[in-house]
Amino acid sequence: MIKTENKKIGKQSFRLKQPPVITAWASVAGKKESEGPLAQHFDITNPDSYFGQKTWEQAERKMQQNALYTLTRKANINIRDLGAVCSGDLLNQCIGSSFPLRNMQIPHLGLYGACSTMAESLIVAAMAVDGGFLENVAAMTSSHFATSERQYRFPLNYSGQRPPTSQWTVTGAGAALLSRNGAGPKITGCTIGTIVDLGIKDANNMGAAMAPAAFDTIKTHFSDFKTSPEDYDLIVTGDLGQIGKEILIELCKKNNIPIGGKITDCGCLVYDNITQGVNAGGSGCGCSAITLCGYLLNKIQNKEIKNLLFCGTGALLSPVSTMQGLPIPAVCHAVVIEGEHA
Amino acid sequence: MIKTENKKIGKQSFRLKQPPVITAWASVAGKKESEGPLAQHFDITNPDSYFGQKTWEQAERKMQQNALYTLTRKANINIRDLGAVCSGDLLNQCIGSSFPLRNMQIPHLGLYGACSTMAESLIVAAMAVDGGFLENVAAMTSSHFATSERQYRFPLNYSGQRPPTSQWTVTGAGAALLSRNGAGPKITGCTIGTIVDLGIKDANNMGAAMAPAAFDTIKTHFSDFKTSPEDYDLIVTGDLGQIGKEILIELCKKNNIPIGGKITDCGCLVYDNITQGVNAGGSGCGCSAITLCGYLLNKIQNKEIKNLLFCGTGALLSPVSTMQGLPIPAVCHAVVIEGEHA
């Protein structure tokens, strides 16, 4: 028996000793997303918000299935050869993630991290692969504008007003395949988030609720890994949107963390905020998922950037907690992704 | 750098090379549970279904907090020294698990595996500890009769009839602490479940929906580990209840797996089905959580049994999927727990 090496550094972080390789990635996106600035990076787009299904919830199932099939096709493996799927979504009881895997004979670890799920699933998958427990693990998540609106806020037909701070839930699914060997970007370090709650109660201002969690995890990450923003080509938060991103930059400035030139946010990348009428930007599990499993990983693959700190942010509210007058707890998980030749 | 050893066996299973030790466990239970046959094994019981809070959802938060405080007290560590908490629950967006950790500065991995969550959280925590990524990781879950009834079925005041196949959601929270060193039962192997759906659509008969998933995982477990029921002192399913347990036994009989004398089910242990009026038995994440983190782990500790195959079962339905006429997918995760001197 070999003695397990301690990979833990600091309280929240660990290094991967044999960094799992992201050998393939895939993204599926809806109509609005396919009209945005990242359109060329999506593998599958569909102008039909139902994706050929009878309900939007089933459309979300279909998107995840499409992402998984595309992922395994790109990785040149059979879908039933997937070692496991680590996935979750925003729907009550995560039915967007369980229904796609019915009778597929694929081991499944269900996750709930709200919009931080893409990062959380990468962390769990990376532990499973680096630890030697599993091989060929897919990290996946999705969200759908229509399922989210009617679950969290109002039925779409109600035509509720959207305040300027509101964000637009991305319709899309993203998946990444983690393997022990192969070519592709590598996951070299992770920082698991703690739950931060500064008392924001406005469910239409989730960027403000999540920014302190993003700040907390990013600060901890730099401290644990003894790095600074200049060590990364890009620091990308999940879906803070314009308002949350500005709060994060302000928090960093106050704490002498020079993040300014490096920071961007998936919620600000995925849509053209001005012409697409999305108010503060994109959100939802699918927001960081399709931005990562397309635009960002392509950027590393094409050697436009060497590395990336991917920080998934999640607002852990529910309509029940909101109606009961509770504030919005938030979490942010960070993952270091490095190019093969970084 | 050391080469990671492959711990994976078969498609769904892995061994733990340095088996994480369950150094402490804690359980919190409600009134009905404290009147049942396992009463003496619970650390905290409370006759108030609100646990001193204003809402039942907040009661669930309180139960998890109590479980965590009791756990760390029993393990003689400060709650802020927890390396991470892997937890989830049945509430929409898992607010029973995120709210207890607000501003506690404890890294959190949120899970959703419905009533299989206790087993799933043990698996993720075991990978994190054995892999050297984290230390002192709590695996935790909870459920509450009142929050579940109003979320999944009807408001309690409606006094809906409960069919004979229905199960009673346990009010309780259970937590286990996994460490690299120390004394206590060890987790030596895990089998991750796949999602099985044989088309059961009756949300009041979840035992029948989950039994095929339990059968699938148990059969795979024996095959992967090359073991048989006689290698275990006890095989305990999560919350199949009386009907689901009988279906599982029937499935095993048909497939020549002699599970009969070894099988029991947390849903059949936690209440006295005859005098407590729970119809087919107990259910909910809390069911297997308080049965494990009390009665079962005590049994190992007291050397009444040497080892245990703990099989958490989860029905991955949501009220939306039920109302949309979809069947109930189910999952079962299995964990081998062995006594120190097994």
Image (cartoon, coloured by chain):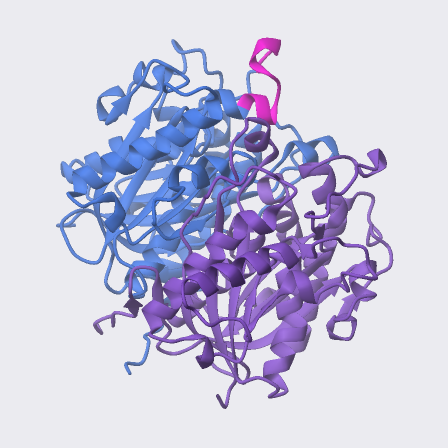
Chain colours: A purple, B blue
Is residue A84 visible in this depiction of the protein?
A: no
Left/right placement of residue B215 relative to residue A191 reads: right
As drawn, A136 above or below A94: below
Q: Position of residue A64 (x, y in %)?
A: 68, 57
| Residue pictured at 62% horizontal, 55% vertical | A243
Please count the marks in the image: 0
Q: Quadrant of the N terminus of chain B?
A: bottom left
Q: Nearer the viewer, residue B239 or B230?
A: B239
Left/right placement of residue B222 relative to residue A168 reads: left
Q: Nearer the viewer, residue B223 or B156?
A: B156
Tell which residue pokes out farthest to the bottom in this image. Answer: A341
Give yes or no for residue B152 being in the magenta stretch.
yes
Please state the extent of the stretch shown in magenta in the rendering.
Answer: B149-163
Quarter location, residue A95 = top right
Quarter location, residue A320 = top right
| Residue pictured at 79% horizontal, 36% vertical | A160
Give yes or no for residue B199 being in the magenta stretch.
no
Left/right placement of residue A304 relative to residue B83 reads: right
| Residue pictured at 58% horizontal, 60% vertical | A245
Q: Position of residue A176 (x, y in %)?
A: 59, 69
As drawn, A311 above or below B112: below
Is residue A280 visible in this depiction of the protein?
A: yes
| Residue pictured at 50% horizontal, 44% vertical | B113
As drawn, B92 above or below B18: above
